[in-house]
C-alpha cells in the first residue's frame, strides 16, 4: 500500500500543530519546515479544517491549530479521511473495473484483509503518541509540553 503525498503532508501539518500547540501556526512556517508548496499545503489544510482536525483563523494574525487534543486525533481516521475511497487495485473500483477474474479472485480478498489490517494498526496510534516525548521531532518542528507523559509511539 502506498501513502499519497496528500496524506503525508496532512500528517506533517498535524504533527507541526501538535508540537506548537500553544500558538497559531502559519502556512508559510509549515511549508518551510515540511518542504512542501504553500498551494498544495493550502488544499490539505482546507480538507483538514473541513473534516474537523484543525481550525483556521483568517487575517493578519491568523493561522491554524489543532481542533482537538492530540490524544483525540487517531492516525487511522486521518488516513481514511485524506486518502478517501482510493481503490487499492482495479478490482476495488466501482467504475472502470474490467478485471475478468473478479468473481473468483482470492487476491482481492487478501488485499482487502491487508488494507483492513493496515488501518486497524493505525487506529491504535494517536497524534500524541507520534509527537509526545519525541525530542528529535520537536527539534525540527518546535517545542511543546505533553499532556500525557506516558504516551509513546508504537515500536
Image: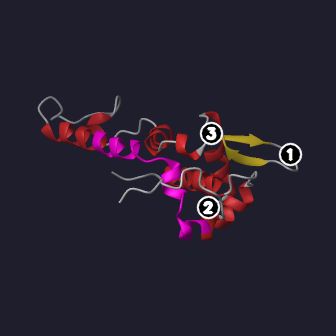
What's the residue at 61%, 71% (across, down)?
139
Q: Which mark is residue 59?
A: 1
The answer, for residue 121, to whether it is visible in the render is yes
Please indicate whether residue 113 sits to the left or right of residue 146 in the image.
left
Magenta includes 88? Answer: no
Position in image of residue 67 (x %, y %)? 65, 39
Judged from this view, the residue extending furthest toward the right is 60
Q: Main secondary structure of the magenta part?
A: helix
Q: CA distance from mark 2 to mark 1?
A: 22 Å
Label 1 SS: loop
Q: Magenta residues?
A: 116-138
What's the residue at 19%, 36% (across, down)?
109
Question: For this rendering, which residue is in front, 99 or 87?
Answer: 87
Task: Give the labeled residue for mark 2.
Answer: 36
Compared with 117, 26 (above or below) is below
Question: For this rendering, which residue is in front, 66 or 86?
Answer: 66
Identify the coloring: secondary structure
**Quadrant in which the C terminus is drawn:** bottom left
Nearer to us: label 3 or label 1: 3
Q: Earlier in the sequence, mark 2 or mark 1?
A: 2
Categorize mark 2 by other alpha carbons within 10 Å: few (<14), some (14-19), many (20+): some
Nearer to us: label 2 or label 3: 3
Magenta includes 125? Answer: yes
Pointers 3 and 1 in contact (C-beta within 8 Å):
no
Q: Which mark is residue 68?
A: 3
Position in image of residue 122 (x %, y %)? 39, 46
Label 3 SS: loop
The mark tally for this picture is: 3
Amino acid at each position: 500500500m502506498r501513502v499519497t503525498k496528500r496524506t503525508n503532508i496532512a500528517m506533517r501539518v498535524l504533527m507541526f500543530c501538535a508540537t506548537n500547540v500553544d500558538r497559531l501556526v502559519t502556512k508559510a512556517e509549515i511549508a518551510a519546515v515540511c518542504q512542501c508548496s504553500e498551494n498544495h499545503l493550502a488544499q490539505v489544510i482546507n480538507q483538514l479544517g473541513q473534516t474537523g482536525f484543525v481550525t483556521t483563523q483568517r487575517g493578519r494574525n491568523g493561522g491554524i491549530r489543532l481542533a482537538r487534543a492530540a490524544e483525540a486525533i487517531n492516525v487511522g481516521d486521518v488516513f481514511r479521511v485524506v486518502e478517501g475511497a482510493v481503490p487499492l487495485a482495479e478490482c476495488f473500483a466501482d467504475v472502470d473495473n474490467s478485471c475478468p477474474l473478479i468473481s473468483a479472485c482470492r487476491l482481492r480478498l487478501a488485499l482487502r484483509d491487508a488494507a483492513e489490517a493496515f488501518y486497524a494498526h493505525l487506529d491504535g496510534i494517536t497524534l500524541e503518541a507520534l509527537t509526545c516525548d519525541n525530542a528529535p521531532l520537536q527539534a525540527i518542528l518546535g517545542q511543546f509540553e505533553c499532556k500525557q507523559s506516558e504516551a509513546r509511539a508504537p515500536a
